[in-house]
């Protein structure tokens, strides 16, 4: 027995995914981009700058969903072996979307209770009440992470199921471009929305929150002014995300999926168990090497997520809406990077060299962001973030293209779950590290710019480390190892 090469012509009768279908698939990622703005932009900024919740506590809470990442491997294998609505992937996506949309709304209600406790206490303190609300927030966000895992892993596995090597990089470019388009749309609309909320709260000065002007802290937006509008936002956006997921995926798996045809014809869908899938994943040393690359790359890329909006506020004097809009400038750059990379760079440089180039350019952009802080000119920061986004797009498309190549057809969900585990755990660590390093920097340096710069410098160092690890990745060795491992497992099942 072998892997998908057993039946090289088995999928020839299935239609090829066209541009319109790629766009439809991207609609779900568009919704995920909107949700990302809700958590790591809107909620992050409001908790730190308006509700006076410490950066470490906020970053830790927002990192909890990522620590649920080990479940992604199980959800991936589950979607390989068990169908919902007679489909391997789509049912998981739809049910998970309903669950994580409900969970994030509940989480916001807990944030209000935590904020009221902070206000009544006159500031943050580890009192019994605050500790209980913080634990409750972490628990709900943990469930949110599980629901997100049950959705995103089967969706990415679906991309493997419906694609071939000759069109996979194009699908990746389109679908991930839609993800960032969601971030851009969310950032722009969120900026307008939050500026209106801030004005309604009668803020003194051009900004609120943790901005220090001449040694005095400006007034925060009143909790009562934030509650109603933000509650509405956290109801509407999850509903839109579910609608986009339904519209984007309905009918696609049944028409285009090659999953059943790529497995051995004598193999039942549930013949490769979870334990067998893990054996396949562990069969090649290349799995560990690429896993380590993803971890290093992701941590180095996303440490600034929890600190970028406060950076715009404290160092550049931006309002809530203006700092939320920073995600949009980054997103515009990523969209350009995705488009250019998927259709032009990867075909010319190859996937590995593309990822290497992206790491190098991203490291350079972190120093540009620091230099922008010395000028204290918001426009220079915006230009730096566009360049940072382009570098991110180049590195991400290269890494994702490698990731999908390092996936065996029979255990696609399990491999995608493994790579998603690396990315999600790394984002959790990155989010937490960003907050912790910022707090340490604040304790060491009197100047906010130097405190934030400590985060960006550490990210640049990490990117150079990622390049070193990437040099050891070998796709051919990976395919040979996994092919033999799957053959051994299936032969054992037949003999047994």
Image (cartoon, rainbow, N blue to C red):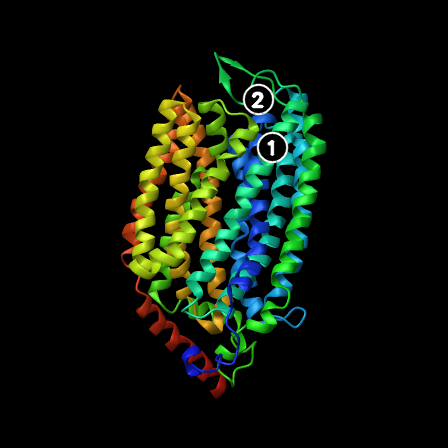
Q: Position of residue 209 (x, y in %)?
A: 56, 23
Where is residue 292? Give x, y as percent. 37, 54
Vertical side of 334 occupied by 309: above or below = above
CB within 8 Å, label 2 to label 1: no
Q: Quick check: 392 left or right of 237?
A: left
Percent of width and height locating residue 78: 57, 67
Which is nearer the eye, 188 or 49?
188
**SS for callout 1:** helix
- Please tell me which residue is depicted at 39% across the width and 72% down the height of the picture: 482
Q: Residues within 10 Å of mark 1 (few under 14, many from 20)?
A: some
* Mark sitting earlier along the chain (2/1): 1
Q: Quadrant of residue 343?
A: bottom left
Tag 2, which secondary structure?
A: loop
Find the distance from the CA under tag 2 to the CA under tag 1.
16 Å
Q: Position of residue 2 (x, y in %)?
A: 41, 81
**Which residue lies most toward the bottom here?**
495
Quadrant into which the N terminus falls: bottom left
Q: Residue at x 34, y 38 (%)?
A: 365
Circle 2 residue:
208
Q: Is residue 29 above or below residue 279?
A: above
| Residue shown at 40% from the left, 49% from the top | 337
Q: Which numbered tag is attached to residue 192?
A: 1
The residue positioned 56% from the left and 43% from the top of the image is 185
Residue 239 appears in view: yes
In the displayed structure, does residue 220 sit left or right of residue 340?
A: right
Could you tell whether 180 is left or right of 480 in the image? Answer: right
Q: Is residue 3 visible?
A: no
Q: Is residue 30 above or below residue 486?
A: above
Judge by depth and name the residue closer to the eye, 415 or 352. 352
């Amino acid at each position: 027995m072998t892997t998908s090469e057993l039946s090289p012509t088995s999928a020839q009768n299935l239609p090829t995914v066209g541009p319109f279908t790629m766009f439809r698939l991207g609609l779900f990622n568009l919704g995920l981009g909107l949700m990302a703005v809700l958590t790591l932009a809107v909620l992050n900024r409001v908790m730190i700058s308006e509700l006076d919740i410490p950066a470490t506590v906020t970053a830790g809470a927002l990192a909890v969903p990522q620590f649920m990442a080990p479940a992604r491997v199980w959800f991936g294998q589950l979607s390989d072996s068990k169908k919902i609505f007679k489909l391997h992937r789509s049912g998981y996506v739809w049910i998970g979307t309903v669950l994580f949309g409900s969970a994030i709304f509940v989480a916001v209600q807990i944030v209000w209770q935590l904020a009221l406790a902070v206000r009544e206490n006159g500031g943050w303190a580890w009192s019994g009440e605050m500790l209980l609300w913080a634990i409750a927030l972490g628990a709900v966000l943990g469930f949110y992470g599980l629901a997100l895992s049950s959705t995103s892993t089967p969706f990415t596995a679906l991309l493997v199921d419906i694609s071939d090597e000759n069109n996979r990089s194009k699908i990746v470019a389109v679908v991930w471009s839609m993800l960032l388009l969601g971030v851009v749309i969310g950032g722009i609309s969120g900026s307008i929305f939050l500026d209106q909320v801030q004005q309604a709260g009668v803020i003194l000065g051009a900004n609120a929150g943790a901005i220090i002007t001449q040694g005095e802290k400006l007034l925060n937006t009143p909790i009562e002014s934030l509650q109603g509008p933000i509650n509405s936002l956290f109801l509407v956006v999850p509903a839109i995300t579910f609608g986009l997921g339904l519209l984007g995926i309905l009918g696609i798996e049944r028409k285009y999926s090659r999953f059943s045809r790529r497995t051995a014809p004598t193999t039942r869908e549930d013949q490769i168990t979870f334990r067998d899938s893990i054996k396949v994943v562990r069969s090649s040393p290349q799995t560990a090497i690429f896993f380590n690359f993803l971890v290093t790359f992701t941590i180095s890329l996303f440490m600034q997520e929890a600190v970028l909006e406060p950076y715009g506020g404290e160092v550049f004097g931006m309002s809530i809406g203006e700092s939320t809009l920073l995600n949009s400038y980054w997103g515009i750059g990523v969209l350009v990077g995705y488009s250019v990379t998927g259709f032009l760079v990867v075909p010319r440089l190859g996937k590995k060299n593309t990822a290497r180039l992206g790491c190098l350019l991203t490291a350079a952009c972190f120093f540009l962001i620091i230099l922008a802080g010395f000028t204290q000119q918001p426009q220079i920061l915006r230009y730096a973030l566009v360049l940072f986004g382009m570098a991110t797009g180049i590195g991400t498309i290269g890494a994702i293209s490698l990731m999908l190549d390092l996936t065996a057809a029979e255990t696609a969900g399990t491999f995608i779950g493994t790579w998603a585990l690396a990315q999600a755990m790394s984002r959790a660590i990155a989010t937490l590290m960003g907050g912790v390093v910022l707090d340490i920097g604040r304790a060491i340096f009197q100047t906010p710019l130097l405190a934030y710069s400590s985060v960006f410098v550490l990210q640049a160092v990490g990117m150079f480390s990622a390049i070193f690890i990437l040099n050891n990745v070998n796709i051919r060795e990976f395919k040979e190892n996994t092919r033999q491992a799957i053959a051994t497992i299936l032969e054992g099942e037949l003999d047994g």
